[in-house]
Amino acid sequence: MTAALEASSSVTGDDLLPKFSSVLASRRESENIPRGRLKTRTEKRRRNSLDYTISTSEDFDGIQNIPALRKLHDLCVWLRVLTIHSDLWDAEVGIRLGIDNTTRWSSWYHVIDRLLKKIDQIKAFMTDHEARLGDIRLLASDWDLLQKAHAFLQPFASATLYAEGSTSSIAQSLFIMDLLLLHYEEQRVSSLIGF
Protein backbone atom coordinates (compact mmCIF):
# COMPACT_ATOMS: atom_id res chain seq x y z
CA MET A 1 0.00 0.00 0.00
CA THR A 2 2.86 2.36 0.79
CA ALA A 3 4.36 1.83 -2.66
CA ALA A 4 1.03 2.67 -4.24
CA LEU A 5 0.67 5.84 -2.15
CA GLU A 6 4.24 6.77 -3.02
CA ALA A 7 3.61 6.38 -6.75
CA SER A 8 0.39 8.34 -6.55
CA SER A 9 1.70 11.14 -4.33
CA SER A 10 2.68 13.27 -7.34
CA VAL A 11 -0.73 12.81 -8.97
CA THR A 12 -3.59 15.12 -7.99
CA GLY A 13 -7.32 15.42 -8.43
CA ASP A 14 -9.44 12.75 -10.06
CA ASP A 15 -6.40 10.79 -11.26
CA LEU A 16 -5.16 10.09 -7.73
CA LEU A 17 -7.32 7.13 -6.71
CA PRO A 18 -7.02 5.26 -10.05
CA LYS A 19 -3.23 5.73 -10.00
CA PHE A 20 -3.07 4.47 -6.41
CA SER A 21 -5.15 1.37 -7.22
CA SER A 22 -3.27 0.53 -10.39
CA VAL A 23 0.11 0.70 -8.67
CA LEU A 24 -1.17 -1.36 -5.76
CA ALA A 25 -2.65 -4.00 -8.08
CA SER A 26 0.40 -4.17 -10.33
CA ARG A 27 2.75 -4.55 -7.39
CA ARG A 28 0.60 -7.31 -5.89
CA GLU A 29 0.40 -9.20 -9.21
CA SER A 30 4.04 -8.79 -10.19
CA GLU A 31 5.54 -9.95 -6.92
CA ASN A 32 3.47 -12.93 -5.75
CA ILE A 33 4.64 -12.10 -2.26
CA PRO A 34 4.33 -14.78 0.40
CA ARG A 35 2.74 -13.59 3.67
CA GLY A 36 5.02 -12.47 6.46
CA ARG A 37 8.14 -10.37 6.74
CA LEU A 38 11.74 -11.29 7.16
CA LYS A 39 13.33 -10.36 10.43
CA THR A 40 17.01 -10.08 9.52
CA ARG A 41 19.14 -9.12 6.56
CA THR A 42 20.83 -12.52 6.72
CA GLU A 43 17.49 -14.24 6.35
CA LYS A 44 16.65 -11.90 3.44
CA ARG A 45 19.87 -12.81 1.64
CA ARG A 46 19.24 -16.50 2.26
CA ARG A 47 15.69 -16.24 0.86
CA ASN A 48 16.76 -14.16 -2.15
CA SER A 49 19.24 -16.84 -3.11
CA LEU A 50 16.31 -19.26 -3.46
CA ASP A 51 15.08 -17.47 -6.64
CA TYR A 52 11.78 -16.10 -5.52
CA THR A 53 10.78 -12.61 -4.57
CA ILE A 54 10.28 -11.68 -0.95
CA SER A 55 8.94 -8.39 0.32
CA THR A 56 10.59 -7.06 3.44
CA SER A 57 10.05 -4.06 5.61
CA GLU A 58 13.11 -2.60 3.86
CA ASP A 59 11.00 -2.32 0.69
CA PHE A 60 8.70 0.14 2.41
CA ASP A 61 10.05 3.32 3.94
CA GLY A 62 6.75 4.26 5.53
CA ILE A 63 5.66 7.86 5.50
CA GLN A 64 9.00 9.12 4.23
CA ASN A 65 7.96 8.37 0.65
CA ILE A 66 4.49 9.93 0.92
CA PRO A 67 5.04 13.69 0.93
CA ALA A 68 1.64 14.65 2.38
CA LEU A 69 1.98 12.24 5.32
CA ARG A 70 5.62 13.13 5.89
CA LYS A 71 4.75 16.85 5.99
CA LEU A 72 1.83 16.24 8.36
CA HIS A 73 4.03 14.16 10.66
CA ASP A 74 6.76 16.82 10.55
CA LEU A 75 4.16 19.52 11.31
CA CYS A 76 3.00 17.55 14.37
CA VAL A 77 6.61 17.21 15.52
CA TRP A 78 7.30 20.91 14.78
CA LEU A 79 4.39 21.86 17.02
CA ARG A 80 5.84 19.81 19.89
CA VAL A 81 9.47 20.87 19.59
CA LEU A 82 9.17 24.43 20.93
CA THR A 83 6.60 26.01 23.18
CA ILE A 84 6.61 29.12 20.98
CA HIS A 85 5.40 26.99 18.05
CA SER A 86 2.58 25.39 20.02
CA ASP A 87 1.56 28.73 21.59
CA LEU A 88 1.42 30.37 18.16
CA TRP A 89 -0.59 27.44 16.79
CA ASP A 90 -2.99 27.42 19.74
CA ALA A 91 -3.63 31.15 19.38
CA GLU A 92 -4.34 31.01 15.65
CA VAL A 93 -5.76 27.52 15.06
CA GLY A 94 -7.06 26.39 18.45
CA ILE A 95 -6.84 22.60 18.08
CA ARG A 96 -4.14 20.10 18.99
CA LEU A 97 -3.38 17.64 16.20
CA GLY A 98 -1.78 14.97 18.32
CA ILE A 99 0.73 12.77 16.54
CA ASP A 100 0.69 9.56 14.54
CA ASN A 101 1.81 6.47 16.39
CA THR A 102 2.43 2.98 15.07
CA THR A 103 1.05 1.38 18.22
CA ARG A 104 -2.11 3.47 18.49
CA TRP A 105 -5.08 2.27 16.44
CA SER A 106 -6.32 4.81 13.88
CA SER A 107 -3.80 7.47 14.94
CA TRP A 108 -3.34 8.67 11.35
CA TYR A 109 -7.08 8.95 10.91
CA HIS A 110 -7.45 11.02 14.09
CA VAL A 111 -4.59 13.39 13.20
CA ILE A 112 -6.03 13.93 9.71
CA ASP A 113 -9.55 14.31 11.12
CA ARG A 114 -8.44 17.08 13.50
CA LEU A 115 -6.51 18.74 10.70
CA LEU A 116 -9.50 18.80 8.36
CA LYS A 117 -11.81 20.20 11.07
CA LYS A 118 -9.77 23.42 11.05
CA ILE A 119 -8.70 23.45 7.40
CA ASP A 120 -9.33 27.18 6.83
CA GLN A 121 -7.47 28.26 9.97
CA ILE A 122 -4.58 25.91 9.23
CA LYS A 123 -4.24 27.15 5.65
CA ALA A 124 -4.21 30.74 6.95
CA PHE A 125 -1.60 29.76 9.59
CA MET A 126 0.58 28.15 6.93
CA THR A 127 0.36 31.21 4.71
CA ASP A 128 1.15 33.59 7.59
CA HIS A 129 4.09 31.50 8.83
CA GLU A 130 5.47 30.17 5.55
CA ALA A 131 9.06 31.08 6.43
CA ARG A 132 8.92 29.29 9.81
CA LEU A 133 7.32 26.16 8.41
CA GLY A 134 9.63 25.82 5.42
CA ASP A 135 9.10 22.62 3.45
CA ILE A 136 6.49 21.19 5.85
CA ARG A 137 3.84 23.56 4.51
CA LEU A 138 0.96 21.56 3.03
CA LEU A 139 0.25 22.26 -0.66
CA ALA A 140 -2.99 21.76 -2.60
CA SER A 141 -1.96 18.25 -3.70
CA ASP A 142 -1.15 17.35 -0.08
CA TRP A 143 -4.59 18.51 1.09
CA ASP A 144 -6.19 16.46 -1.68
CA LEU A 145 -4.37 13.28 -0.64
CA LEU A 146 -5.14 13.87 3.04
CA GLN A 147 -8.86 14.30 2.33
CA LYS A 148 -8.92 11.07 0.33
CA ALA A 149 -6.95 9.23 3.01
CA HIS A 150 -9.41 10.53 5.62
CA ALA A 151 -12.39 9.22 3.64
CA PHE A 152 -10.70 5.85 3.11
CA LEU A 153 -9.61 5.42 6.74
CA GLN A 154 -12.90 6.48 8.35
CA PRO A 155 -14.55 3.01 8.22
CA PHE A 156 -11.43 1.46 9.76
CA ALA A 157 -11.54 3.93 12.69
CA SER A 158 -15.26 3.28 13.18
CA ALA A 159 -14.75 -0.49 13.05
CA THR A 160 -12.06 -0.26 15.73
CA LEU A 161 -14.45 1.55 18.07
CA TYR A 162 -17.28 -0.85 17.28
CA ALA A 163 -15.15 -3.91 18.04
CA GLU A 164 -13.74 -2.82 21.37
CA GLY A 165 -15.23 -3.68 24.71
CA SER A 166 -16.10 -6.71 26.76
CA THR A 167 -18.95 -7.78 24.45
CA SER A 168 -16.83 -8.14 21.30
CA SER A 169 -16.54 -11.58 19.76
CA ILE A 170 -14.78 -13.43 16.98
CA ALA A 171 -18.02 -13.48 14.98
CA GLN A 172 -18.26 -9.73 15.30
CA SER A 173 -14.62 -9.35 14.24
CA LEU A 174 -15.14 -11.55 11.18
CA PHE A 175 -18.21 -9.53 10.20
CA ILE A 176 -16.23 -6.29 10.56
CA MET A 177 -13.37 -7.68 8.49
CA ASP A 178 -15.82 -8.62 5.74
CA LEU A 179 -17.25 -5.10 5.75
CA LEU A 180 -13.79 -3.54 5.63
CA LEU A 181 -12.78 -5.80 2.77
CA LEU A 182 -15.95 -4.78 0.93
CA HIS A 183 -15.10 -1.10 1.56
CA TYR A 184 -11.58 -1.63 0.23
CA GLU A 185 -12.84 -3.44 -2.87
CA GLU A 186 -15.47 -0.75 -3.55
CA GLN A 187 -12.81 1.94 -3.31
CA ARG A 188 -10.57 -0.03 -5.64
CA VAL A 189 -13.33 -0.59 -8.22
CA SER A 190 -14.50 3.03 -8.09
CA SER A 191 -10.93 4.22 -8.61
CA LEU A 192 -10.58 2.00 -11.67
CA ILE A 193 -13.87 3.29 -13.10
CA GLY A 194 -12.91 6.86 -12.31
CA PHE A 195 -15.50 7.93 -9.74
Image (cartoon, rainbow, N blue to C red):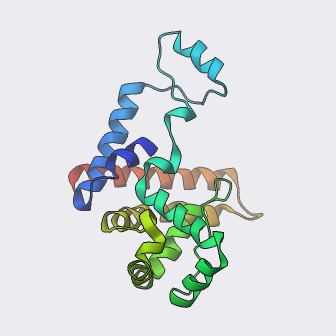
Q: Is residue 50 above or below residue 145?
A: above
Q: Is residue 105 visible?
A: yes
From the viewer's side, name the closer residue of 1 and 97: 97
From the viewer's side, name the closer residue of 144 and 61: 61
Say which residue appears at 30% left-offset and 52% top-offset.
Answer: 10
Say whether residue 81 is left or right of residue 28: right
Say whether residue 52 is left or right of residue 11: right
Can you say which quadrant of the picture contains the N terminus? top left
Question: From this viewpoint, which residue is outermost toward the bottom?
Answer: 91
Instruction: Give the percent coordinates (x, y) of residue 96.
Output: 60, 78
From the viewer's side, name the closer residue of 17 and 75: 75
Say which residue appears at 47% left-offset and 80% top-offset.
Answer: 117
Say whether residue 177 is left or right of residue 32: right
Q: Is residue 173 above or below residue 95?
A: above
Say which residue appears at 49% left-offset and 64% top-offset.
Answer: 72
Question: From this viewpoint, which residue is outermost toward the front?
Answer: 131
- Which quadrant of the structure image shows residue 157? bottom right
Q: Is residue 186 above or below residue 72?
A: above
Count of marks placed on residues: 0
- Which quadrant of the structure image shows residue 57? top right
Q: Is residue 195 visible?
A: no
Instruction: Give the percent coordinates (x, y) of residue 122.
Output: 44, 80
Question: From this viewpoint, which residue is outermost toward the right?
Answer: 166
Say which residue appears at 37% left-offset and 33% top-offset.
Answer: 27
Instruction: Give the percent coordinates (x, y) of residue 16.
Output: 28, 55
Can you say which quadrant of the picture contains the C terminus? bottom left
